[in-house]
Amino acid sequence: MKKIILVFSLFLIGFSVQSQEVKKKKSAKITFEVDGICGMCKKRIETAALKTKGVKFAIWSVETHQLNLILDERKTDVATVQQNILAVGHDVFDADDKKVVATTEAYNSVHPCCKYRDEEIILDHNGDLKKQKKQ
Amino acid sequence: MDKNTPKDNLGVEGASVHWLHTNVSAITNKKGWFSIPYKEEYKKLVVNYLGYKTDTISITNLKAIHHFLTEQSELKEVIVKAKKKATYKSFLSTTNMFTVNSGELLKAACCNLAESFETNPSIDVSFSDALTGTKQIQMLGLTSPYLSITQENIPSVKGASQVFGMTFTPGTWVESIQITKGAGSVVNGYESISGQINAELVKPFSDNKFFLNAYSSLNGRLELNTHFNQKISDKWATGVYIHGNYRGEKFDKNNDNFLDSPLANQINVMNRWQYIDVEKGWVSFINVRFLNDEKQTGELNFNPTLDKGTVNAWGSEIDTKRFETSAKLGYVFPELPFQSVSLQFAYSNHQQDSYFGLRTYEIEHESIFSNIIFNSIIGDTRNKFKTGISFTHDNYEELVSITNYDRKETSAGAFFEYAFDNLNDFSLTAGLRIDTHNLLATFVTPRIHARYVPWENSVFRASAGRGKRSANIFAENQQFFASSRQIKVDDVGGNVYGLNPEVAWNYGVSYMQKFNIFDKKGDITFDFYQTDFTNQVVVDWENPQEISFYNLKGNSIANSFQVEVNYNIAPYFNFRTAYKYFDISTEYIAGNLQKPMHPKNRFFANLSYETPAKETGAQWKFDVTFNNIGKQRLPNTASNPAQYQLPSHSDSYQLLNAQITKVFSNKFEMYAGVENLTNVQQENPILASDDPFGSYFDSTIVYSPIFGRAMYAGLRFKIK
């Protein structure tokens, strides 16, 4: 009897694994937040995302900090993309909206004007935005 | 919440919400709820979510908000254009392309497409002859037949409309122009050799609800443009655009008994329909257009009803009727914004009835163009491709004096263009097309463009490509009809007028460096292009009693070098200058000669200043353009009697144009300007004007303005 239950539960596990496979989309739309500040950050974030094998499309918004992705779930997952973005020095927000901080080493690799953790630089960029608006 | 399913009341998870122009933002949770810090100065809330339209909501109180998002397709982005600089040189595009916006077009009295390049150094504008008043454009030293001119990517100025076609698109209809130097994209066909000019017309959804432009010049030209645009539903919009111009006064300032500019009238009506379904990803345009253009020129006392076909007085009339219709359909896969399919179809019927003295010229050209393009990616958006098929059919019925030249051209082709972008310092576009044509046989057209950023703020570009076309010798060189020249066509047994098709390779390099001097931005660009003809239909003017067309034997090379500097001297004060050098030599029967009536050296400068706009939009705009046109070689006239001879070279001369615009409000503005301020005039634009039916009459040797100083004024009125 135990054996039967075991076999049955194994079968169930197999089934549930399979059903999860089916769910993996070839072109899944995914959105999460990435910290950054300017056009240069945008380029760095999008490049890191796109260079992840399986990511087809990546757009990051300077204004909203949202990174919109289309990726092939059979080839990659959100965690891998986030790892690659952390590696180039940008903090990301995981599924529970918790901030995952990039290592200091990685953060230090970004251009001085992209130091998004620095209050002063943030203010500086806002000033820039205002100047552009006026012109 | 998703607009499609309001009843489910399902929230959108992961949408971002932020206050306009701030970094204060929030993300919606699983139910689509959010809360966001608030300050009194925050008035507008922006909601952003992938695949949906970005909405901006005005917040007037602190109550909870319900907001429905509308799904959007990426195609919408193609239609809505952000306001950029008046002339925009792309730093990122792989091709050497720049965009001229309507702002730039307003800088000069551009009444039609041919005249809209006066403030642009890359395109040279000159008169084609002394009679028709037609302006001709050139790029890289080559005239428009070697340039592909498209209207919203559908070939427009070609075949029968080659010479006058540019004057058939009113300036106010143009929203922007994209100019690409060198070999273009294979997607648009195989004919372009020196470059491409694409004109985007105003769109019913984005153009003013009502627009009026009235223009009048002291040389007797009157113009009226009106636009009416109407939204039919949230998916359909339509616009009616009417243009009329009229010149009824006779001018003969140089006392040669010939009209300095033709009597003319044109009626041009277009109706556009635009369809956008953002939810399903469909976009469409449908256009219908009709044109009637009449010109009369010749001797002052010429009366068409009495003198046509006689030697009482020399005169000419050119009447054109043109009907065209086109449709475009685009579909973007809603789940995959990088994948789309589009279909273009165009039909036109062009009928020109004309006579030049005793010579009749009639041409009817029916044209069908169709193209299907599929866009997608390989792996990710760093590797894109376009592929598709095209079909064209042209039917020509041409009558020159008493000889009929009828022909049909049919071609079918397939193309593939791959674009790579490493998102950093390198991009490449490589295209190939194969066409099979009833008169040009089956041939391959390769084109390649590359872009490299060697260091900050600079970009290096290179291109190479092949072009092939059948020369439409009469339609493209109509000006020679207004002379006593005998027509000679060297029949070598080719399929088009007995001639073989033209084939050329174009190579180019360009380097642009942006700089910052005294805290002011500027850029400098160096361009070098070479067009090398392996076969050309040579137009030989060297015998003053003849015009002959023959296939090239030997070399024909056009070299063009340009250096251009743009500098922002002070806020609202811009300076643009360019030096251009052209070396265009062709093997004529008489030997290897420089192209006639084409200066080797040109210098261009443009200054523009505008006062800061007030709240109401009120401002002043000033614009001055200077051109120095170098010495030009004139066609050989040595065998003529002494009084009908011209020197071997023309003198250089300077041109100055200026315009002032006073903007009163966002609705109303007035402008006034002067063309050819220093009153430069060609002394003797018509050879043997005293004996127009004799064997030395020639109105084709035109190298400087015929009409002196011309003042104009106009107004623009718009309702958004």
Image: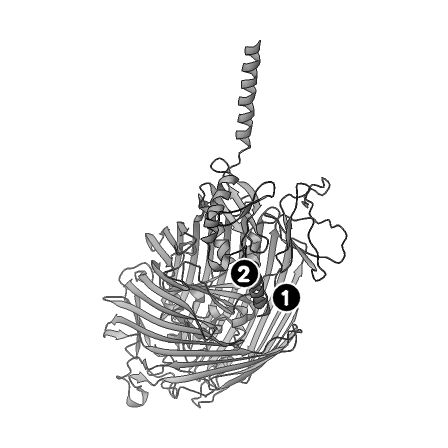
Residue B133: image x %, image y %? 46, 78
Q: Residue at x 42, y 61 (%)?
A: B396
Residue B41, compared with residue B47, is above or below; it is below
Residue B283 placement (x, y as % from top left): 57, 52
Name the quadrant containing residue B578: bottom left
Q: Is residue B241 visible?
A: yes
Of residue B704 and residue B69, the one placed in the foreground of this image is: B69
Q: Counting other residues with Cα less than 10 Å from the Cα at mark 1, is it few (<14), some (14-19), or many (20 or more)?
A: some
> Of the residues shown, which amino acid type is indicated by label 1?
Asn
Where residue B53 appears, as percent x and y from the top left, is 62, 51
**In the rendered view, does B399 fall on the left or right side of B202?**
left
Picture coordinates of residue B597, whole percent (x, y)? 34, 78
Instruction: Single out the residue that lies furthest toward the front.
Output: A104
- Is residue B387 something one can see in this rendering? no
**Going by the picture, which residue comes out furthest to the top?**
A1
Which residue is more in the foreground, B627 or B410? B627
Residue name at image x 33 percent, y 71 percent: B561
Residue marked by disc 2: A121
| The N terminus of chain B - image quarter | top right
**Label 2: which secondary element:** helix
Label 1 marks a residue whose chain is: B
Q: Which residue is mark 1?
A: B208
Q: Residue at x 64, y 57 (%)?
A: B237
Q: Which mark is residue B459?
A: none
